[in-house]
Image (cartoon, helix red, strand yellow):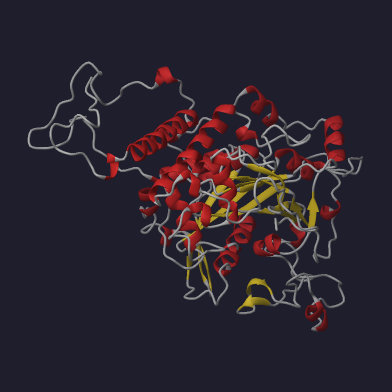
Amino acid sequence: ENWLDFTEERSHPMPIYYLNEEARDARHRHWQSIVEEDRLYFNRTESEMKWVFHPPPTSPPVVLVGTNEENTGTIEVNSSLENSILVDTTANCIENLNSTSLLHGTFYFAPTSHDVNIPAHAIHRPSWNRVQQNMLDDDAIDTEKEKERCKRYNYEYNNRTLSKRRRLFLGTMIADESMEVIQAVSSEVYNLFHTVSIVESNVTHNLSPRKWRFGMGSDNLLKLQQLFGPKTKVSVDYYVTNLTSTNGDDLLSDYIQREGNNLRWSLNGMEPDDIAIVGDCDETFSRDYLRALQVCDVPEFRPGKKCRGEKIMSSTLVFESSPKCVTKGRRWFHPDALLGECVDQVGDESIHLPSKREWNDKHSNFKEGYGGGFNFTLYDKDGLGGDTGKYPLWFATDIRMNPGNWASSRDGSATGFHFHNFFESAKEIHWKYLTYGHAWGGGGDRPIWEIHEDIELGVQCARGVKYENWLDFTEERSHPMPIYYLNEEARDARHRHWQSIVEEDRLYFNRTESEMKWVFHPPPTSPPVVLVGTNELK
């Protein structure tokens, strides 16, 4: 009874911006989608969403004389995503951590999820439906099922195949990815990895300063360290750069920051027969394919490798901003996997002599001719391989950037998923395209669908534009889709949220529906042209 209608406020006009009914409605729908997302995340029913702080609805709120605030008995806390990113919770802590200082910067190594006590209020209890739970209950090795699984990917399963699963070590970086996309990835790999190594930096890719988002003891960190399952050691380590220039390479910081993954893998005891997997926070191999990598006779994982190019790349299905926005034939090629004996800090450097690299000869990617672009002619010419016929050990950036074998299933189904641009607001999308890898200078002066062709696909999907190349969530051949989104409520909630983001940006740039035309892609009646041998649309 105490809600105040927008048009009721006595004689005084209400805020000018919201004298536009479309703007009021768009913001309200966006807020409703946020509430629904949080309800689903904490697995609450509508009936459990009761008043906690305020008086029952039948009692009027108490207004403090001389103020405009209601007395709720609590202190107001600003918990918006923007502000949580800007809270520096580790500034006075990381200097006490074990660290490794290199010419380009310093890595600080924080406790793993197995070394911290989670407070009662921060305990995360995942909730799965029956389909999801069945897919996650796959720890036991069933010989017949494993043979069938290996066959799906053209691998063998025989008496020489491991009787126990290979251990998996993940390396990635984190910045402003939404918690939803982290949940989508972690649900797919729940309890699969031995180690999840995450590195957070104090700068973006173009060296714009940023504050720690997953600082020690923060709620963000406590939640993140539980999402991958209790069997997995999860760490967020911190990188403080010394770089003052990217030397014209907008991904230099990315390449160098990933060195922290190698250092963490070594700290956590990676062995030569373990598997290193490198990706971004919004990418993952499918659970089924990861299980195949653990037990099948995978040629790239047989011991005694030269370490010249025996890596695996995912055939990755791309979800653009929503689990309902997928296009046929659009495949990318990360994450990537490599045998531990070829990984720097793990393999034998006495027979895999170091190569020359692009930054100060010792850091970033291999130089051309020394492994860059799969070209080792100068490495061989300089005799760095000696008489061993072996090649250098790989940094995490090499695992990601060097060529490899593209893995797909027998029927062409994907072996991985990429949850691309799953942000929480249009503002975050503009920030990404201004400051991160593949930054685009016009990211702040035009609507999101005019920034990049990827976003354009997501926007037209959110609008419900008919396009013959949309792929329905249930259509992807024989392969299961991402486990997190095998929940219709979760799919619908994210899609509604994405629609509200698109609407918010349309209103901000004062565009009409008719002005939201295709810019980068062919008209809806024409299928995209797939370049042979690539994963890109022309």
Q: Quadrant of residue 285?
A: top right
Residue 349: give x, y in percent of width and height: 74, 69
Residue lying furthest left = 66
- Image location of residue 135, percent across then percent down: 69, 30
Q: Is residue 353 left or right of residue 517?
A: right
Do we see residue 190 in this rendering? no
Report the quarter where the N terminus lies.
Answer: top left
Residue at 30% x, 24% y is: 52
Residue at left offset 82%, top offset 53% = 301
- For the C terminus, the quadrant is bottom right
Residue pushed farthest bottom?
A: 382
Which residue sits furthest right?
159
Q: Residue at x 73, y 55 (%)?
A: 535
When the figure is inspected, residue 48 is found, relative to residue 529, above or below; the finding is: above
Vertical side of 428 occupied by 139: above or below: above
Q: Nearer the viewer, residue 518 or 482?
A: 518
Which residue appears at 54% of the width and 40% of the height? 462
Q: Position of residue 372 (x, y in %)?
A: 73, 72
